[in-house]
C-alpha cells in the first residue's frame, strides 16, 4: 500500500458507505481516471485505464481481490496493482483514507 503520508492533496471521492465489499467504481479526483475497490474491508485506489489498450477497468469484474479487464481478460491484484500474468506491468496505486464517513484519495 502506498505511503499515505506522501500524498500532497487528499480529494474526497465518495461516501465510504457507497462502496460495498467486492465492489469497484470509477472516480475522477482532479480529473484523474481511477478505480476504487473494496477488498477484505480495505479500500484501494488504482489507475482506471488498462495498461494494455486502455479499456475502463471499472467495467470489468472483481472477484477475490482480482480485477479482470473487460476487454481481453488481463488480471490485476486490486490490492497491489500487480499484473498477475507477468511482471512487466503494474497498475499505479494511490493512497486512500477515510474521514468523517467519506473516502479520500491522495493525488500528487
Ligand atoms: S485493454 Fe485490458 S486486457 Fe486489453
Image (tube, rainbow, N blue to C red):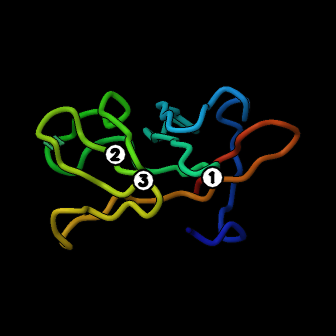
Q: Residues within 10 Å of mark 2 (few under 14, many from 20)?
A: many
Provide residue 38's location: percent of width, then percent of height.
56, 43
Residue depicted at x 38% and y 60%: 81
Picture coordinates of residue 85, whole percent (x, y) = 16, 63
Residue visible at 77% across and 36% down in the picture: 102
Left or right: 84 in relation to 19: left
> Do the numbered discs 2 and 1 sit on residues whose CB atoms are within 8 Å?
no
Q: Nearer the viewer, residue 37 or 12?
A: 37
The reply to whether callout 3 and callout 2 are in contact (CB within 8 Å) is: yes
Q: Position of residue 97 (x, y in %)?
A: 72, 53
Residue assigned mark 2: 67
Reading the image, the residue beneath label 1 is: 42
Q: Residues within 10 Å of mark 1 (few under 14, many from 20)?
A: few
N-terminal-most mark, 3 or 2: 2
Q: Do the CB atoms of the residues marked 1 and 3 lie less than 8 Å apart?
A: no
Image quadrant of residue 17? top right
Quadrant of the rendered structure where residue 76 is?
A: bottom left
SS of the residue at dot 2?
strand
Q: Is residue 100 above or below residue 25?
A: below
The C terminus lies in quadrant: bottom right
What is the CA distance from the residue labelled 3 to the residue labelled 2?
6 Å
Mark 3 lies on residue: 78
Asked which secondary structure carries label 1, the reply is strand
Q: Earlier in the sequence, mark 2 or mark 1?
A: 1
Residue 63 placement, left or right of 107: left
Residue ID at (63%, 72%)? 3
Asked if residue 75 is positioned above or below residue 87 in the image, the reply reads above
Q: Quadrant of the N terminus?
A: bottom right
Query: Marks 2/1: CA distance?
Result: 15 Å
Q: Secondary structure at mark 3?
A: loop
Amino acid at each position: 500500500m502506498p505511503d499515505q503520508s506522501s500524498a500532497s492533496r487528499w480529494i474526497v471521492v465518495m461516501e465510504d458507505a457507497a462502496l460495498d465489499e467486492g465492489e469497484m467504481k470509477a472516480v475522477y479526483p482532479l480529473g484523474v481516471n481511477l478505480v476504487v475497490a473494496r477488498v477484505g474491508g480495505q479500500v484501494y485506489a488504482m489507475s482506471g485505464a488498462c495498461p494494455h489498450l486502455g479499456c475502463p477497468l471499472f467495467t470489468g469484474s472483481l472477484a477475490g481481490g482480482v480485477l479482470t479487464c473487460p476487454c481481453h481478460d488481463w488480471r490485476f491484484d486490486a490490492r497491489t496493482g500487480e499484473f498477475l500474468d507477468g511482471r512487466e506491468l503494474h497498475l499505479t496505486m494511490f493512497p486512500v483514507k477515510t474521514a468523517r464517513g467519506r473516502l479520500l484519495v491522495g493525488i500528487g
